Amino acid sequence: MSNRDIVNAYYEALARLDVDAFEALHHPDVIYNVSGNTIISGRYDSFEALKTILPLIFDALDFKQFQFAENWKIMNDGPDGTTAIMEAKGVAKNGKRYDQRYAHIFTFRDGKIASVHEFFDTQLANESLDFIGKPPCQTDGDFRL
């Protein structure tokens, strides 16, 4: 699979909420850097560590009215990695709109995703997903370039 194919499969799995297929695309020691000042912001040094934050996000959304990866576009695909933008649209369980745009920068190793830098509207996430006032997640450190 090419890097472009991996990224398309990433968004397709996310759109279907197929966590097993999503996980299979990642190197076991993938590093996620999640931007901003939310309870999930920071660095995660493995997919296992990343899985600790997925329930916080998934439990806040009404998947009868919400769709991850409704639309995406690969903006750049080169030997050093792939950059894409993804749109998610819908309603959180609290009734608030969560129409979010994500920018992802991917690197790859051994035919798997080796790292992801994720950027999104953190104020929207805090307000729509009721993150305000909740304790921050345990991370492996601060966001790192």
Image: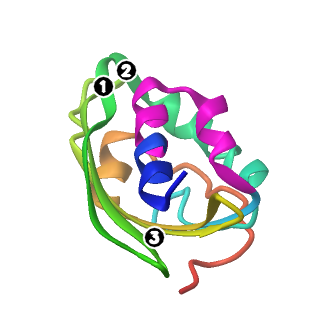
Magenta stretch encompasses residue 14: yes
Q: Name the element at disc 2.
A: strand
| Residue 9 or residue 91, whichever sits in front | 9
Q: Position of residue 128 (x, y in %)?
A: 31, 41
Colour pattern: rainbow
As measured in the structure, the alpha-carbon distance from the residue carrying label 2 to the one carrying label 3 is: 23 Å
Question: Circle 1 sits on which residue?
Answer: 66
| Front disc: 2 or 1 | 1
- Residue 79 in percent (x, y) is at 47, 79
Residue drawn at x 58%, y 83% is 144
- Which residue corresponds to mark 2? 62
Q: Residue most toward the front?
A: 1
Q: For the residue carrying disc 2, how many other residues have a C-alpha within 10 Å: few (<14), some (14-19), or many (20+)?
A: some
| Cα–Cα gap, marks 3 and 1 | 22 Å
Sequence-wise, the earlier of marks 3 and 1 is 3
Q: CA distance from mark 2 to mark 1?
A: 6 Å
Residue carrying label 3: 35
Q: Position of residue 27 (x, y in %)?
A: 72, 57
**Do we see residue 130 in this rendering?**
no
Between 18 and 39, which is closer to the camera in this rendering? Answer: 18
Q: Are marks 2 and 1 in contact (CB under 8 Å)?
A: yes
Badge 3 marks a residue whose secondary structure is loop
Q: Verify whether residue 46 appears in magenta.
A: no
Residue 65, picture quadrant: top left
Q: How many marks?
A: 3
Say whether residue 89 is left or right of residue 42: left
- The picture places residue 57, in percent across and down from the top left corner, at 50, 39
116 lies above or below 40: below
Label annotation for residue 4:
none
